[in-house]
Amino acid sequence: MTALLARRHLLLTAAGAFVAVAAPARATPAIVAAEIARVLGGKVAQRGRVRLDVPVLVENGNTVAMTVSVPEKTTAKLLSFHIFAEGNPLPQVAAFHFGPRAGAPKIATRIRMATSQTVIAIALFDDGSAWTDSVDLLVTLAACLEDA
Amino acid sequence: MARALINVPKIARKGELVEIRVLINHVMEPGHRRDAMGAAIPRDIIHSFVCSYNDEDVLRADFFPAMSANPYLAFSTIARDSGSIVFTWTDDQGVVQTERATITIL
């Protein structure tokens, strides 16, 4: 009886795994572009000013240390950072809005990576400009998709 | 909701750049995983975080499922006046957790 149950459990697990694979595991480029365009609101992001630091080789995609900063002093005030991971099931990672009491234009956190991909940071400034930086990284152990 | 670790200096000089580090216990279930029986595990993440210093915003953050479990953040503020720094996390189940740190200007 237990052997039968174990077999049934195994079959169900296999079925579950199949469904997980069948579901969209990665956002399409169109969705990623649309999400980025929504944040930019018609502005064109130029490369520079903002700096994205993530390891190029990631062993564990469940916790990837990430730092976003504006390394050089700017006359314009930083409004927000927006982070995207184009290879995740949902491309948005986080948005950080800097308030009147914000200190240095810098944020450090930990994020999840489902696969090897490009991570994109966008910074919006109060002079209406938008800046971007991106990093291509390799992930050995993927996050998000394994069964619990 | 959960245990939160907050790291803010107790005292600071006026005008000093003060680093703030916070970490909170939370599963941050992304909502696209399945359990052993193949059933979808519902999404449960902290979707918003706010830090304010004497009732003025330092940082507001929107989180998506790509934030790691037990979300950690490091950022900064400028110590201008003595008072309280308040941290608020809100999750998908509507649980709101508020923590407070006090800072004294020398």
Image (tube, rainbow, N blue to C red):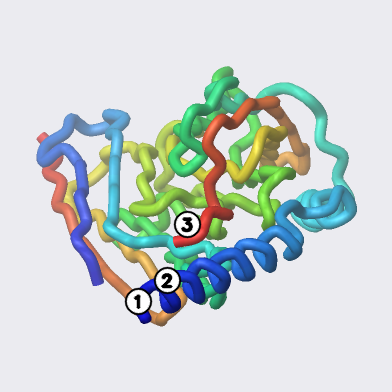
User: Residue visible at 59% across and 21% down?
Assistant: A56
Q: Indicate which disc residue A91 carries.
A: none
Q: Nearer the viewer, residue A43 or A128?
A: A43
Q: Is residue B22 left or right of residue A97?
A: left
Mark 2 residue type = Ala
Instruction: Point out residue B14 in the picture as x, y percentages from the top left corner.
Output: 22, 33
Q: Is residue A13 above or below residue B71?
A: below
| Mark 1 secondary-structure assignment | helix
User: Chain for mark 1?
Assistant: A
Distance (Cα) linking label 1 and label 3 = 52 Å
> Which quadrant would the N terminus of chain A be assigned to in this image?
bottom left
Which residue is under mark 2?
Answer: A6
Whether marks 1 and 3 lie on the same chain: no
Residue A94 falls left or right of residue B29: right
Question: Circle 1 sits on which residue?
Answer: A2
Helix, strand or loop at label 2? It is helix
The residue tagged 3 is: B60
What quarter of the picture does the C terminus of chain A occupy? bottom left
Q: Quadrant of residue A70?
A: top right
- Residue under the image location 74 percent in, 33 percent down: A131
Whole-number angstrom distance, CA of label 2 to CA of label 3: 48 Å
Q: Secondary structure at mark 3?
A: strand
Please state which amino acid type lies under the numbered disc 3: Arg
The residue shown at (84%, 53%) is A28
